Every structure is written in structure tokens, then in C-alpha cells.
Image (cartoon, grey):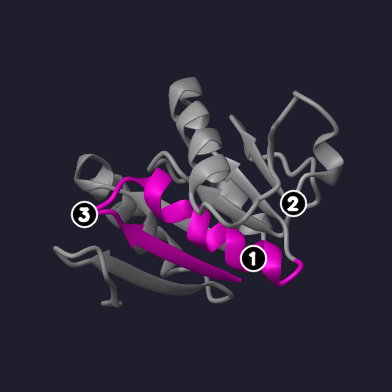
Amino acid sequence: MKVDFYHLAASPVAAVLPRIAARLVAAGERLLVVSEDAAARAALDAALWSWHPESFLPHGEAGSGDDAVQPVLIAAAPIAANGARNIALADGVWRDAALGFARTFHFFDDRTIEAARAAWRMLAGHGEVERRFWKQDGQGRWEQTG
């Protein structure tokens, strides 16, 4: 499995996540987006609706409709009711349940960087996990640093 750590240094997760979600959906994949904070989930929902004026990114919030058909499902817990093989941990909190997915996107900022570093070190002991570390520069471009 792959775990991509994204250090959000110039943009909030709501500005970054839609591009990744769109790529996954275009490839026929599904994504589960997890955040414990209801306000953050609402912000992600709004961002997925409006991220690109010429496109539509189908998604829903867990419990608000037919979760199973949603290509992108936003939830408070890491339960893939939409059958997603990809998970985005959008609130900076590592969850061991992410190890049950094919790919994990772990987003964190300076406020949650120490917890992300602890997760990085913990995952070093998992031989089946391929870790990558991405950091934004001042212009918001991504650079792989690990």
C-alpha cells in the first residue's frame, strides 16, 4: 500500500483535495475523505462543488443519501461505505484503519506536523507500506522530499 504525506504549507486541504479527488474519479477510483470536524467536512463539501467551474465532481456526505454510489464520500470515520480503496485523512489525524486501504493521502499542516512525523516513523516498521512525503513551496507547488 502507498501512504502519501502532504504537508500543507501554502494552501488549506480544501484547496488541495479536489484535484486529487478529480484524478482518482477520472481513473475510475473511489475516495473516502475523513475529518472528525463537522465544519471541516462542510468546507470540503463546498470545495468539491466549486473547485473547477467547468467540471462536476460527484460526491456526498456519509449518511445523507446513498453512500454506496458516491465516488467521493466525506465522513467522520474511516468506514468506506462507498467501497473506496483510497482514503484521504483530511484533518491531520492518523488512523490505523487507513492501513486497510490501497492508498492513503494524509494531509497535515504546521499545527499537526508532530503527529504526522510520529505516523511517518511508525509506518517505517511496516514493510508493505511505501511512504512518500510531499511539501508545498511558497507558491503552492508540490515537491517530493521523502
- Left or right, 66 with respect to 119, comes to right
Instruction: Determine crowd level at label 2: few under 14, some 14-19, many 20+ residues with C-alpha closer than 10 A.
Output: many
- Could you tell me residue 14's position as x and y percent? 41, 44
Mark 3 highlights which residue? 10
Residue 2 magenta-drawn? yes
The residues colored magenta run 1-28
Give the quarter of the image for residue 10.
bottom left
Indicate whether 84 appears above or below 95: below
Work out whether residue 130 can be spotted.
yes
Indicate whether 16 appears above or below 42: below
- Could you tell me residue 146's position as x and y percent? 30, 77
Tell me the quadrant of the picture where the N terminus can be found: bottom right
Residue shown at 55%/44% (left/top)?
48
Mark 2 highlights which residue? 71
Give the quarter of the image for residue 67.
top right
Secondary structure under tag 1 reads helix
- Left or right, 104 with respect to 12, comes to right
Residue type at tag 3:
Ala
Residue shown at 76%/68% (left/top)?
28
Choose between 47 and 114: the one closer to the eye: 47
Residue type at tag 1:
Leu
Mark 1 highlights which residue? 24
Which numbered disc flags the more N-terminal residue, 1 or 2? 1
Label 3, label 1: how far apart the Cα atoms are = 23 Å
